[in-house]
Amino acid sequence: MDTEIELKFAVASNDDEEGEPAPVAGLIESLLAPYLQVQGNVQKRLINTYFDTPEQKLRAYDCGLRVRTRDDYVEQTLKTAGSSIGGLHKRPEFNIQINHNTPDLDLFPAEAWPEGVNVAELQAELTPLFTTDFTRTTWRVVLNGSEIEVVYDIGEVAAQNSQQAIHEIEMELIDGDMRELFNLAEQLLDELPLRLSNDSKAARGYRLFLGQTPADKPALGVVDVQPDMDVETAFSQAIQHGLGFWQYHEENYVSQGKIKTLQRVLLGIWLVRHTLWMYRSFIPKKASTEIRKELKWLSSQFDWLDEALHVKQLTSKKGNYRKRIGEDEKLLAYLEKSFESQVQENAVIPLFYSARYNRLILKLMRWIIERGWRCYSEIEEQKLAQNIATVANELNQQSWIKIQKQMPLKKEFELADYIASERPISRGLLTGACVGNLYDSELRENFRSPWLDILQGISDLKTLNLFIYYLENYREDNEAQLRSWGENKIAKLVEIMEQSRQSALKMSPYW
């Protein structure tokens, strides 16, 4: 058995005038030249057929099975459950040479299989699902005593008469220090348009086979913290949860371009930022200064997004306001033009392939893997070793007090009050996401539900408020009528939200 430790990067599409891929291989070779074990590279065509049962039983076990042919060599590979942080993948794999194109599961050692797997049953049901066909260019380098394999793959994955391009770089640590893998990655990032990716060839193949398009996750969910975890582990879990949510939706946006997906990207970024803030008495701010600075920069790149989403809500065919606004073609065209200009002026794809963006993710990954905060003398071992269950109540209560101060029960709230309350409510809900798994799920969700509704109400208020703002530059005869409609909608919504707020503030917290 081998365990892969690798970084995976998607390469930006950058076709030349003839429509052929840009000479990425040549750029890689020039960058790697000082470290090459042997000058030049090895180039081979790899054809892989992935197998599973019709019900995808192997996938359910988080296993992947393929048969790879290159020249006259045939090999079957079983990859079993592993882990992924950012774009760093660790996954056990079993490779066995065979002399035919159909896998023989009995050749894998018994310890390769998860407990309870019926190997004979799987063998009888195996069927080919999809293929990958690509050219792989390989370099072997040595960097400060560590051996690293760099590969550049270009080709396609195909299933059910559908194809998807493969254009990526993988860097695998063969032997040595994982830090050198990151150091080499940073050098490539400075010269090539790359994006850290968790989307494997197999995952893309399964989606093609099933005819699926990856959907945005409906909610952030709760971090997988357990009652026996210490604070340090819970902190790390929360960072990884936020980064995973962020990168999942980054991948979705790159493939589909839906602006609402960017809202999910930003939510993941905010969970990472909130986690650093929430655990500040355990992980000193000094330990994360550079990361927090870069996360603040990254968040600022989406400052335009909130307004664009509210304009999109006004013009969306499925939105709550299209029926009224759609009656006025001039108004609709005016709003749609504003939305399109904001999106065009704030192109996100170049950001996702930028060196600064990917260096931030690499830095965050390294910090988590190496527990970089332990380099600081301010760290108190006893505080890190505390059981998370013993401090979760206090963390929740701190957020709850801030909401109560922001939204006193006896004060009658208006539009501006609700908009000003968005941030403390959001922070409170993020705290609940970080430690909520420690509590009864029904009690937790019953408490969170009205606050999620209030947060949605605030979003609707901001949409209507923006609508009225846009009317200031709308020079048509019905401007006053439209303004009156918007103000009435706001007044009715605030009245409903006041009832919800009063009830929510009187609820007993689940902690």
Image (cartoon, rainbow, N blue to C red):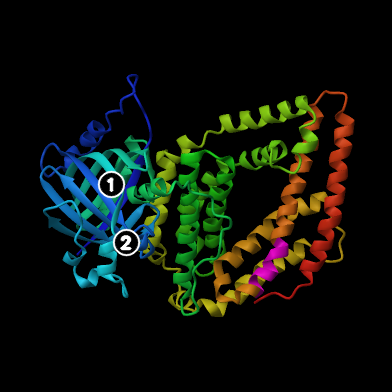
Q: Please give the residue where the numbered disc 2 appears in the rendered image.
A: 63
How many marks are shown on the rendered structure?
2
Residue closer to the observer: 202 or 395: 202
For the stretch drawn in magenta, the main secondary structure is: helix
Image quarter in which the N terminus is found: bottom left
Q: Residue at horizontal 22%, vertical 43%?
A: 47
Image quarter in which the C terminus is found: bottom right
Q: Tell me residue 330's x, y (percent).
A: 76, 24
Q: Tell me residue 387's x, y (percent).
A: 49, 79
Q: Tell me residue 284's x, y (percent).
A: 49, 64
Asked whether residue 446 is drawn in magenta, I would say: yes
Q: Please give the residue where the numbered disc 1 appears in the rendered image.
A: 170
| Callout 1: SS | strand
Q: Does label 1 or label 2 sit earlier along the sequence?
A: 2
Task: Tell me the amino acid under the disc marked 2.
Answer: Cys
Left or right position of 63 against 326: left
Task: Tell me the magenta residue range.
Answer: 443-451
| Callout 2: SS | loop
Which disc, if any, is residue 484?
A: none
